């Protein structure tokens, strides 16, 4: 093969164009990987709709759920990212958006290195090389060079894993990480009831991930019945709620509550990405439950809210309503310990116990003339 065919897109809304690129030389730390299979992801669809938050080097080749076979390899490229030996014939996958390992986020927030400031994308920094490129999996081959871009990561797939199964490793990993986010805040325990919003590929894979990670019951809210919801049940969802039969948020929330029982689900995970899924989904939770927003992956959020930013910023958003009985001693102990360290009494304006005094106390608080109006029936009580 003196040339390699790649599918490129000229920009959002354009059709694919098959172009030929020269067969590259393969230096010592590079590899040429023949693509066996590559998925089409919701992110690809978003990119083609113009929803990607950063500039993209159009025309370029999409496809980041790729699995292939190493067909040429430099002598110095000996192992994959995990240290497993690589050879010609090895089955591999190549994830997109790999952290560079050197930027501020990579060094200081390794758990959030997915927000790397200079990620390696399809084997090239964004806009680094003139198109067309040998990267992106909707192609006959991809080319990677770890000397040029040390952040590039190759992962060996098991020899007996069909490549089309291997393509699912990247989206499945997204689901596993999302569930781990819930584990880290104590929001996902063995036996928990999980509701998945969305029955696309991420929703289906989230069913498998939730069950493998210990969910007791999994319910999916999505559409359409065929093929998506039927497949979710084949993957082990106990039941499914179809948007076609439950057209309003209220109907869907009621349906979830009827299935999971009175208080709602322990964990709800948005894999749908619809801008209103979040506000709807939190009503499917029991009080004290955990919500993970992984569906709103791009800036295609609602124009009315910035809800999608929970996902794109990879943040922890925690609600906190009052306290429990076991929290009160903490407040008493802190006041006792720190009584001399803060001007506690300066926040208080005192009012006598009388009708006028109570009225003044309330009005001062309303008018923000006092910080903490405090009614004192017996000033010398202690
Ligand atoms: Zn980085």
Image (spheres, rainbow, N blue to C red):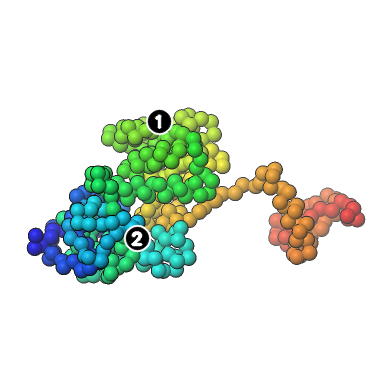
Task: Give coordinates of residue 311: x percent, y percent.
Answer: 43, 53
Question: Is residue 46 shown left or right of residue 212?
Answer: left
Extreme residue toward the right, this view: 380
Tell me the residue at 75%/61% (across/down). Answer: 338
Quarter of the image with the C terminus is bottom right
Quarter of the image with the N terminus is bottom left
Within-10-Å neighbours for mark 2: few <14, some 14–19, many 20+:
many
Compared with residue 316, is residue 240 higher up or lower down, i.e. above or below? above
Instruction: Identify which residue, 218 or 307, lies in the foreground.
Output: 218
Residue 96: in sight, yes or no?
no
Extreme residue toward the left, this view: 2
Task: Give coordinates of residue 147: x percent, y percent.
Answer: 28, 69
Tell me the residue at 53%/49% (across/down). Answer: 185
What SS does tag 1 mark? loop
What SS does tag 2 mark? loop
Compared with residue 222, is residue 107 higher up or lower down, i.e. above or below? below
Instruction: Give the residue at mark 2.
Output: 98
Question: Is residue 319 shown left or right of residue 313?
Answer: right
Tell me which label, 2 or 1, sits earlier in the chain: 2
Tell me the residue at 19%/56% (across/down). Answer: 88
Instruction: Give the residue at mark 1.
Output: 238
């Amino acid at each position: 093969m003196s040339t390699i065919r790649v599918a490129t897109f000229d920009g959002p809304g354009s059709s694919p164009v098959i172009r030929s690129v020269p067969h590259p030389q393969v230096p010592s730390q590079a590899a040429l990987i023949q693509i066996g299979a590559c998925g089409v992801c919701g992110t690809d669809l978003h990119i083609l709709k113009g929803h990607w938050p950063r500039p993209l080097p159009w025309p370029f080749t999409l496809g980041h759920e790729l699995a292939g076979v190493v067909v040429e390899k430099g002598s110095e490229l000996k192992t994959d990212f995990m240290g497993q030996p690589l050879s010609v014939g090895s089955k591999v996958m190549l994830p997109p958006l790999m952290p560079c390992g050197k930027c501020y986020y990579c060094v200081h927030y390794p758990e959030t290195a997915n927000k790397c400031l200079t990620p390696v994308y399809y084997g090239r920094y964004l806009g680094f090389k003139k198109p067309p490129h040998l990267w992106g999996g909707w192609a006959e081959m991809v080319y990677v060079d770890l000397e040029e871009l040390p952040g590039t990561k190759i992962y060996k797939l098991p020899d007996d894993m069909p490549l089309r199964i291997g393509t699912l490793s990247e989206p499945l990993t997204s689901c596993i990480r999302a569930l781990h986010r819930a584990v880290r805040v104590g929001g996902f325990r063995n036996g928990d009831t999980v509701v998945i919003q969305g029955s696309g590929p991420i929703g289906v894979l989230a069913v498998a991930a939730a069950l493998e990670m210990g969910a007791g019951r999994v319910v999916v809210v999505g559409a359409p019945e065929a093929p998506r919801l039927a497949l979710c049940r084949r993957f082990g969802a106990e039941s499914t709620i179809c948007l076609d039969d439950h057209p309003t948020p209220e109907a869907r929330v009621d349906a979830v509550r009827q299935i999971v029982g009175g208080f709602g689900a322990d964990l709800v995970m948005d894999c749908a990405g619809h801008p209103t899924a979040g506000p709807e989904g939190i009503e499917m939770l029991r009080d004290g439950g955990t919500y993970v927003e992984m569906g709103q992956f791009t800036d295609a959020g609602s124009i009315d809210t910035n809800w999608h930013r929970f996902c794109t910023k990879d943040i922890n958003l925690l609600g906190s309503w009052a306290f429990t009985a076991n929290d009160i001693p903490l407040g008493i102990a802190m006041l006792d310990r720190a009584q001399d360290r803060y001007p506690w009494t300066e926040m208080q304006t005192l009012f006598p116990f009388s009708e006028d005094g109570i009225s003044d106390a309330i009005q001062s608080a309303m008018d923000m003339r006092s910080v903490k109006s405090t009614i004192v029936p017996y000033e010398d009580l202690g």
